[in-house]
Image (tube, helix red, strand yellow):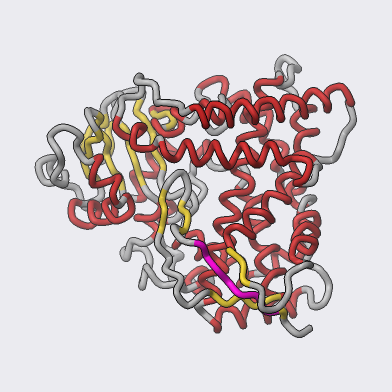
Amino acid sequence: MQHRSDELRAPPSSLLIGHVGSFSRDPLGFLTSAAKDYGDIVRLRFGGRITWFISDPALIQQILVHDWRSFEKGTGLKRSKPLFGNGLLTSEGDTWRRQHNLIMPIFHRERVESYGAMMVSETESYTEPWRAGVTIDMLEATTSLTLRVVMRTLFNAAVDDSGAISEAVECAQAEFARSIPYIIMLPSWVPTPVTPRLRRAITRLDVSIQRLIESRRAEGRDHGDLLSLLLAAHDDDNQQGMNNKQLRDELLTLFLAGHETTALTLAWALMLVSQNPEVEARLVDEAKRVYGERLPQPADRAALVYTAAVVQEALRLYPPAWSVGREAIEDCELGDITVKRGNVAFFSQWVVHRDPRWYSDADKFIPDRWLDGSIAGNPRFAYFPFGGGPRVCMGSQFALMEAVLILSFMLARFRFELASDFVPALYPAITLRPLHPMRMTITARNK
């Protein structure tokens, strides 16, 4: 671990706003340089707020696993409550524990696998109209596809039935991303400006989701979807279920987490595969060997070993959740520093996942590193695309199964040629997105 004195561990900053300007101009570049030049613990200042940027996997594990009760979610997620409400993503303390216990059973392995066939069916239906020579924006396509999947698994509804929800979510995400400069600079007690557009989008979301909840409650029928499971969930201690507000918050959290991050994973994976023909050939051969002419099934996932390695490597290089923040609620010893109450501990999957200490040729796409044992000795938190500890993303297995089955299906049916002028410039807002459209030309494979 590289630990230095406070005088040596802080990059140059503005007297008034600290490191806000450098971070806002190029978050990924700034954090990468900070870790390289100043070590595993870097002292940053955003306005009047002290933030410790951590790149040592052992210290990240300490925060997320061992000392997690000394921290709560960071400022960014706190400020997202107008959008997410008080769901699992943003809640704390007893509220979080109760919701966690209520929701955890719906993500048991058997339950998740039951949705696999639906994921493949939606993919087959969505890609059926694709014709050779057509050029598409791949992120737009994967977003539309994963929206169909989440609507079917969450609400047992077609996308056409959810236009108001999906449109409002898109608007709300865009407006929230614009507020990030305020979020990183202002103290947590200062309200973040909520734009009229964001307020209207949230109102539309609330109306649409509440109407759906009330309709389901009145119906009282199990639709075989996640909403039915949430309605049936109850606390073992007092046998109480969730009220409409709690359901709204959890549904919206699952909706957002359930389609955008998987859409990004698929888009980045397809970009990387299109640039590596030998990887593409191995993926196609694996699909032929495992399921041949039929559709892939959830049971095939265990045999799609190389496809899973490609997904893991895509998540390493382009993690949709590219940073994590935790605010200290009590003083905490971290390495050779004291993180004081109110300080923020901040770490970045982007930086750690590309650290040459843990990955040889760290910026290169090498799926075999997940199969050849070369990273077997890495620290646990040298790779954490879904976070970690008690607050690890509960839907990670759902997302991984979806990504593996859809990626294998799409590459078994089609070739994707990336536009020659595409530059993988990045837009790190709430999630890590491509700055420019990811145009790809489709060619159907001969069966």
**In this view, which residue lies farthest toward the top?**
238
Instruction: Quadrant for residue 356, please give it.
Output: bottom left
Image quadrant occupied by the C terminus: bottom right
- Percent coordinates x, y for residue 100 in the rendering: 62, 30
Magenta span covers which residues? 437-443
- Percent coordinates x, y for residue 340 in the rendering: 26, 27
**In this view, which residue lies farthest toward the front?**
196
- Membership of 440 in magenta stretch: yes
In the image, what residue occupies the spot 52% across and 40% down?
173
Residue in front for this viewpoint, 43 or 299: 43
In the image, what residue occupies the spot 77% across and 67% down?
129
Q: How many dots with numbers?
A: 0
Query: Is the residue 111 above or below the residue 234 in the image?
Result: below
Residue in front for this viewpoint, 435 or 26: 435
- Membership of 68 in magenta stretch: no
- Percent coordinates x, y for residue 106 in the rendering: 72, 38
Left or right: 32 in relation to 177: left
Query: Is the residue 143 above or below the residue 256 in the image?
Result: below
In the image, what residue occupies the spot 73% across and 74% down?
131
Main SS of residues in magenta? strand
Instruction: Quadrant for residue 394, please give it.
Output: top right
Q: Quick check: can you spot residue 152?
A: no
Q: Quick check: can you spot residue 150?
A: yes
- Percent coordinates x, y for residue 405 in the rendering: 70, 63
Left or right: 429 in relation to 417: left
**In this view, which residue lies farthest toward the left?**
7
Query: Is the residue 288 above or below the residue 246 in the image?
Result: below
